[in-house]
Image (cartoon, rainbow, N blue to C red):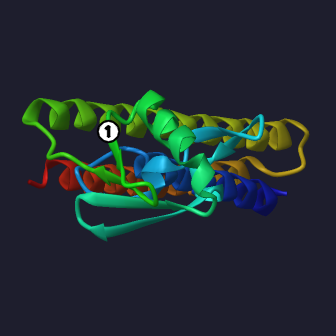
Amino acid sequence: MINEIKKETEDKMKKTVEALRKEYQHIRAGRANPALLEKVTVEYYGAPTPVNQLANISAPEARLLVIQPWDKSVLPALEKAILKSDLGLTPTSDGAVIRLVIPQLTQERRSELVKTVKKRAEEHRVILRNLRRDANEDVKDLQKEHIISEDEGKRAQEEIQKLTDKYIREVDQVAERKEAEIMEV
């Protein structure tokens, strides 16, 4: 029973850290990354379609994204979708491909992004703590039902705390790496 609770909690904690990593991919750090366009959707034959399903996205240079649509007729719609998105980028098209030049981040924008990174990290720390609380409640329920002894319950709670500490450290490391990436000039 205790092992199941710990395993389930650890799985959820891993997923929480992975979700944070995925979120951080969408934060522009002054470097071209095809993941920036993952959330951009284009109206294609009446259905909102992600850019990566309509075109090949590559980063040939550190500050350049090249979007090469498989169907050239979607080019104007792609441009509009990128302009409407919250990326703050202006696409340039030559009729065959769209180029997105990623501008250098200003110091002000960098500090805003760092605040966002810290905020997201804190949100994920809270999620981890909530997972710990839920697991501890499950252990306490087992104690109340006399399925496990008090000592086993205490030991399980200590192990859950160690898991929580481990994943909070991991969240901190991921956040620090992203902050360093953003502040890199």
Give residue 136's position: percent from left, percent from top. Answer: 68, 40
Whether residue 175 is visible: yes
Q: Is residue 79 left or right of residue 18?
A: left
Q: Residue furthest bottom?
A: 60
Q: Position of residue 22 (x, y in %)?
A: 51, 52
* Label 1: how many Cα within 10 Å (few below 14, some 14–19, many 20+): some
Residue linked to disc 1? 90
- Which quadrant holds the N terminus? bottom right
Residue sitting nearer the eye, 51 or 115: 51
The amino acid marked with disc number 1 is Thr
Classify 109 as above or below 164. above
Tell me if 93 is positioned left or right of 45 in this view: left
Residue 183: x and y, percent? 14, 48
| Residue under the point 72% across and 61% down | 7
Taking 97 as reference, is 38 above or below it?
A: above
Image quarter (top left, top right, bottom left or bottom right) of the C terminus: bottom left
Task: Choose between 182 and 51: the one closer to the eye.
Answer: 51
Going 43% across and 49% down the picture, which residue do you hit? Answer: 36
Q: Front-most of 141 and 112?
A: 112
Q: How many marks?
A: 1
Left or right position of 162 against 137: left
Whether residue 158 is visible: no
141 left or right of 22? right
Q: Secondary structure at mark 1?
A: loop
